[in-house]
């Protein structure tokens, strides 16, 4: 892959010291790093051969355009050699999903609502820019040391997805967070992000449960198309569940 330096976004690789691995995926690893000997950063390391030049450029250019306090902020990149580094702000409490699983029982309903509102702010900003996330879920949000939640993974999750459904047109998406129009037409739009946000709220108020865990993808496709919806979480008030449910409104409104 031949990638040119990103101008003012290009960071000198020697300014970054890698400290420990935070996670790994199909593109490479994410490391905790120290930049210029004073800033803690997250370093997404992209291995050679895992992304096309076009995909990387799209991801990078997207992140450069987006700036909001509830989006994980890009600091810069190291693109001269492999592994490529994407350097972002470090969120010390990790993914929202893992935080809910490990610390959720310590949170009250108001805190859970505030976490959901943080995501809402980010998604309103993205919609104002006519940008579709396509993979909004608790696993793709991060939590900082003050429990503020920020949305991340704006691009790369589109190219490699686990537990995926591939349509006849080759589009890939996660069934358990996907709206019926994606099943039918393989089209993402702001409504598909709204649907996914409702599922994310459900994840928050169940402290990180897997949505629709009793069904495999094939079964779930049939049930969603026939009007099946997620149940009200125990920690959710009727008012909060109404917000979730409004994200999943279709002609058929059967729930379960």
Image (cartoon, helix red, strand yellow):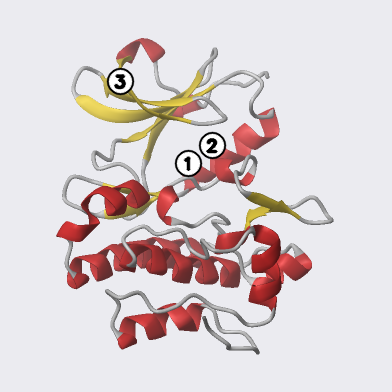
Q: CA distance from mark 2 to mark 1?
A: 6 Å
Name the residue at 74% across, 62% down.
186
Q: Which residue is mark 1?
A: 64
Of the image marks 3 and 2, the number of the one nearer the N terminus: 3
Q: Which structural element holds mark 2?
A: helix
The residue identified by callout 2 is 60
Q: Residue at x 35, y 10 (%)?
A: 14
> With 137 as the anchor, is 132 left or right in this view?
right
Q: Position of residue 54 (x, y in %)?
A: 69, 34
* Mark 3 nearby-residue class (10 Å; few <14, some 14–19, many ≥20): few
Quarter of the view holding residue 18: top left
Q: Position of residue 162 (x, y in %)?
A: 60, 44
Relative side of 193 to 225, left or right: left
Q: Which residue is outermost to the top?
A: 14
Kindly check if marks 2 and 1 are in contact, taking CB atoms under 8 A apart as contact. Answer: yes
Question: Hey, which residue is sitting farthest right in the picture?
Answer: 168
Q: Residues within 10 Å of mark 1 (few under 14, many from 20)?
A: some
Q: Residue 76 got which mark?
A: none
Residue 69 visible: no
* Residue 185 pos. (x, y %): 77, 67
Q: For residue 17, which quarter of the picture?
A: top left
Viewer-proximal residue among 30 and 36:
30
Along the polypeptide, which appears first: circle 1 or circle 3? 3
Check disc 3 and report the residue beneath it.
20
Which of the two marks, 3 or 2, is nearer to us in this view? 3
Instruction: Determine whether the residue tagged by mark 3 lies in a helix, strand or loop.
Output: strand
- Coordinates of residue 8 in the picture (x, y in percent): 44, 28
- At x 33%, y 47%, the residue is 98
Marks 3 and 2, Cα distance to the nearest angstrom?
24 Å
Q: How many marks?
A: 3
In front here: 49 or 9?
49
- Contact between marks 1 and 3 (CB within 8 A): the answer is no
């Amino acid at each position: 892959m031949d990638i040119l330096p990103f101008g003012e976004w290009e960071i000198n690789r020697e300014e970054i010291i890698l400290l420990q691995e935070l996670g790994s995926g199909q593109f490479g690893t994410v490391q905790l790093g120290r930049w210029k000997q004073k800033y803690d950063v997250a370093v997404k390391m992209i291995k050679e051969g895992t992304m096309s030049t076009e995909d990387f450029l799209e991801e990078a250019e997207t992140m450069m355009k987006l700036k909001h306090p509830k989006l994980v902020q890009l600091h810069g990149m190291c693109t001269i050699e492999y592994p490529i580094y994407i350097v972002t702000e470090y969120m010390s409490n990790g993914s929202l999903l893992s935080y809910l699983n490990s610390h959720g029982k310590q949170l009250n309903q108001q805190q859970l609502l505030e976490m959901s509102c943080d995501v809402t702010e980010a998604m309103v900003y993205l919609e104002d820019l006519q940008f579709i996330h396509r993979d909004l879920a608790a696993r793709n949000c991060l939590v900082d040391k003050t429990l503020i939640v920020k949305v991340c993974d704006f691009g790369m999750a589109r190219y490699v997805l686990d537990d995926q459904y591939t349509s006849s047109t080759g589009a890939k998406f996660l069934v358990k967070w996907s709206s019926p129009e994606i099943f039918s037409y393989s089209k993402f739009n702001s409504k598909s992000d709204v649907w996914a946000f409702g599922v994310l709220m459900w994840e928050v108020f169940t402290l990180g449960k897997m949505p629709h865990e009793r069904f495999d993808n094939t079964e779930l496709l049939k049930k969603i198309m026939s009007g099946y919806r997620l149940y009200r979480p125990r920690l959710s008030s009727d008012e909060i569940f109404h917000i979730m449910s409004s994200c999943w409104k279709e002609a058929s409104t059967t729930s379960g």
